[in-house]
Amino acid sequence: MDIFLLLLGFVFVVLGIIGSFLPVLPGPLTSWIGLLLLHSTKVYPMDWTFLGITLAIAILIWILDYFIPAMGTKKFGGTKFGVYGTTIGLLIGLFSPIPFGMLIGAFLGAFIGELMYDGKDTNRALKASFGAFLGFLASATIKFSIAAVYFVLFFIQFWEYKGVFF
């Protein structure tokens, strides 16, 4: 059972890294589940303080993930139309077969949303689209960083007890 939990935990920390770039999968929270599964084995002792701190960080990043792209759009003069367009563009880009579909989708979604708000001011729409693009990049970078740290923590903790696992 411990090997199963270890492998499942590994799958979750890897999914957490992938989820850092996908809006439908919460990256750091998924990676945290991997840490929880490792701590649930009989081999590794349960460390509630470590799990509590890492969970709090994962939840904070998960909440901020909803605000950072919108803040980028607003910072560059965008409206709610641009924010909604960013979200819709991210989802469409997620399922598109083109490379970097989510980045292109966020940019185009914000641009189209801003043009729907005011079709005559393309400069403002372009500026807001750039803000949405930067907000998405900032959010993905933060999520990836935390998920990567959780991945490293998983392996450090596993390596400490590898002799007992195998």
Image (tube, helix red, strand yellow):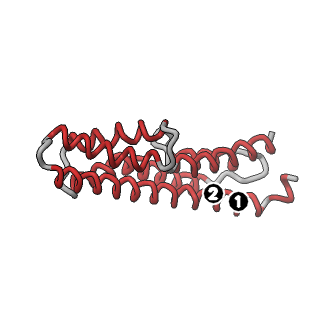
Residue drawn at x 68%, y 49% as measured from the top left: 39
Residue 75 in the image, given as x and y percentages of width and height: 22, 57
What residue did someone put label 2 on? 151
Callout 2 crowding tier (Cα within 10 Å): few <14, some 14–19, many ≥20: many
Residue 51 in the image, given as x and y percentages of width and height: 57, 52
Q: Nearer the viewer, residue 109 or 58?
A: 109
Callout 1 crowding tier (Cα within 10 Å): few <14, some 14–19, many ≥20: some
Assign a secondary structure to mark 1: helix
Whether residue 136 can be seen here: yes
Give the amino acid type for the residue marked by disc 1 in the picture.
Answer: Phe
Answer whether labels 2 and 1 touch (C-beta < 8 Å).
Answer: yes
Whether residue 32 can be seen here: no
Give the amino acid type for the residue marked by disc 2 in the picture.
Answer: Phe
Q: Nearer the viewer, residue 33 or 134?
A: 134
Residue drawn at x 13%, y 49% as measured from the top left: 121
Residue drawn at x 17%, y 50% as measured from the top left: 122
**8 shown above or below 157:** above
Residue 61 in the image, given as x and y percentages of width and height: 43, 52
Q: Is residue 71 left or right of residue 141?
A: left
What residue did someone put label 1 on? 155
**117 shown above or below 45:** above
Disc 2 to disc 1, C-alpha distance:
6 Å
* Quadrant in which residue 116 is drawn: top left
Residue drawn at x 20%, y 41% as measured from the top left: 80
Assign a secondary structure to mark 2: helix
